[in-house]
Image (spheres, rainbow, N blue to C red):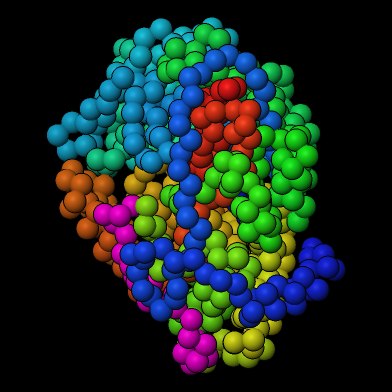
Amino acid sequence: MESMSRTRAAGVAVALVAVVGLVLTGCSQRSNDGAPDNGQSAIGFPETQLQPPVPGKPGGTFRFALVEPTAIDPYNAQESEGVLVTHNLFTELVSVDANGKVSPAAANSWTPNGDCSQWTFDLKQGTTFHNGEPVDAAAFKRGWERAAAKSAASDVAYHMNEIQGFDAMQTGTANALAGVNAGNPGQLVVTLARADCEFYLRTYQTVFSPVPTTAGAADNQSYNDQPIGNGPFMMDGPWQHNRGIRLKRFESYTAGPKANLDAVEITIVPGGQGAVQAEYDGFVNGTFDWARLPTPLLTRARSSYEPRGEWLSKKTNGINYLLPMVTTVPLNNVPARQAVSLAINRAAISQGVFQGSATPADSFVPPVFPEAYQPGVCTVCSYDPQRAKQLAQQAGLTPGSTINFQFNTGGGHEEWTAAVAQELKDNLGLNVNYNGVPFVDLLKNEQAPGASGLFRSAWSADYPTPGNYLQPLLSTAAIGTTDPSRPVTGDNRGRYSNPAFDQLLAQAAATKDDAARTKLYQQAEQIAIGQDLAEIPLWFRQAYRLADTQQFGNVNLDFSENPTLAQITVK
C-alpha cells in the first residue's frame, strides 16, 4: 500500500538552508540494542507498550484529520488515507492484526488444493451489507469483477492478477473472472492462473471487498461517495469532498465484534506543508483525538505526551525509500543509482531532521519480518561521498547534470527531502529540480510515460508477507504495461524488470514450505536491491502518533499504521 505518511513555494529555499544546518549539527542519538552495524548508528525512539485492554461499551465520537483520499470505494482505494476508511466500511475474507497475525473475517476458513492453484473459502453465514443485502459468494465475485473490469481503470486491481480470467478482463475481452466460482452461496472457490501458496493473504487488501447489487459499475458516483459495505462502520451521509467523512456504527454487524464507537468524524485538511501541522494543532487544542506529528516537533511532543500515556511509538511493516525511474536518463544504470544512495548521509539526517527518531535502512524488506530480513543486502546504503563521486563519473552523472526530485506536500516530508536534495548538490554537484506537489499528483506523475529522476516514496505492506514488498513494487507484471509510451497501471512505478527476479518470485509463490519460500524471497531481494538497486532504501518505518487515551481505551496502531477504530471505546 502506497503510504502518504508522500510548485515549489518560495519559502522552501529558506527552509532548505535551515534544514541542512540542522543535519550538520545533529542531535543525540538513541541506539537499539542488537541492530546491525552497517556503518551507521542504529537510531529510533523506543516503542511504547500497548495500553491494557479496556472493556468496550457503546458511545462516543472519535475525531481525527486526513488529507483528501483518492478513493474510499474498494475498487480504487489505494493510499493510507483511503484504505483507512475502506477497511472500516468493508470486511474482507481474512483479518490481519497489528502484528501481522491472520484470522477469520468474512470467511471462517480457507483451504488450498495440493499445488496451491485453487483456494476454497467457506463464508460466515448470516452476515449482511449495511443495506441488509446478504454477503454471499456472489457478493465477493461481484466486487472483484467490478474492480477488475478494464473500464474501472483501477490502480489496485493488479492484486488479482493471479486469478484465472483477470488478464482477459483487463483487456476488455471478458466481463467475468473465469476463475471465481460463486455457485454455492456459502463457498467461494478461486482458481489461479499460477500457483500461490500465500493467495489467502492477498484477500485482506481492500480491492477484494464484496459489494452489494446496488454498487453498479466503478463509475457509479453516488456509490463512490457513499459506499455501502459490510464492515463495522457505515457511511453517515456522503463523502463531503475536501471537507469531511463521517462514519457511524453498523448495528447489525456480525462478521466480528461490533464496534463500540457511535461515530467517527474525519476532517479533511488541505494538502501542503500545513497538513500534518493541522492534525497536531487540532490534537493540542482538543479538536482531534488522534494525530500525526510534524517532524520538527517529535521530541517536544514526546516529552509532553509520553508521561500522559498519549504518545504512541511502533515499528511498523514499512519502508521509506527513493523511487528511481530506472528506464530513463539519468538513473537508467546501476552506478548512477548507487552514486545517489552513497551520497545520502542517512544517519546525519536521522539525527538532525528526525531528531534521532528514524532508523537508517540497509534492506528493502524490513526487520519486522525477522525471518526474511537481510542486514546489509543494500551494499550502498552507507554514506561514502568519495565512492559516490567515482560511481557518478562512471555513470555519466557529472557535476551540473540535472536530476528531478519530487515529493508530496502535506505528509511531513519537506524537511528531510530538502536535506537529501542538498546532499545531492553538495556531494555530486547535481542540479536538483526539487518540487513538491499534492499526493494525488505525485502518484500520477510517477505513472507518467517518460518520468525521470527520483520520487519520495514509502510502502506499508497490504498483507503480511515479504512478497508484498517485492511483487507489487518490483515485478515486471506490476508495471501493468509493456508499452513505454503508456502510463504504469500497477505499483512498479520505476518500471524495473529482471527475468531472474521474476522467476524467483514465481518459485516462491508456488512453494508451500514457509522457510523455503523465505529463502527464495531473500534471493530475489539480493538481485533487485543488492545487485540492481531498483529502489533506494532510506529509513525503516516507525510510526509516531498522539492519541487521547484519557477519554478513549484500546487506541492503538493497526497493521496499516491507522487507528484501531473498531476496537476503540470510551472509558
The correct choice, above or below, for 540 with respect to 250 in the image is below
- 380 is within the stretch colored magenta: yes
The correct choice, above or below, for 400 with respect to 38 in the image is below
Q: Residue at x 34, y 21 (%)?
A: 107
Q: Nearer the viewer, residue 493 or 129?
A: 129
The correct choice, above or below, for 440 with respect to 45 in the image is above
Q: Main secondary structure of the magenta part?
A: loop
Q: Position of residue 382 (x, y in %)?
A: 44, 78
Q: Is residue 81 visible?
A: no
Q: Position of residue 353 (x, y in %)?
A: 63, 68
The outermost residue toward the left is: 114
The correct choice, above or below, for 403 with respect to 394 in the image is above
Q: Nearer the viewer, residue 519 or 37?
A: 37
- 244 is within the stretch colored magenta: no
Displayed quadrant of residue 42: bottom left
Q: Nearer the viewer, residue 301 or 67?
A: 301
Q: Residue at x 14, y 34 (%)?
A: 114
Q: Is residue 15 visible?
A: yes
The residue segment tinted magenta is 369-390
The outermost residue toward the front is: 307
Q: Position of residue 9 (x, y in %)?
A: 82, 65
Position of 478 with respect to 65 (left or right) is left
Q: Residue at x 33, y 52 (%)?
A: 369
Q: Residue at x 75, y 74 (%)?
A: 18
Q: Position of residue 366 (x, y in %)?
A: 39, 57
How many labels were placed on the picture? 0
Position of 11 with respect to 355 (left or right) is right
For the C terminus, give its image quadrant. top right
The outermost residue toward the right is: 10
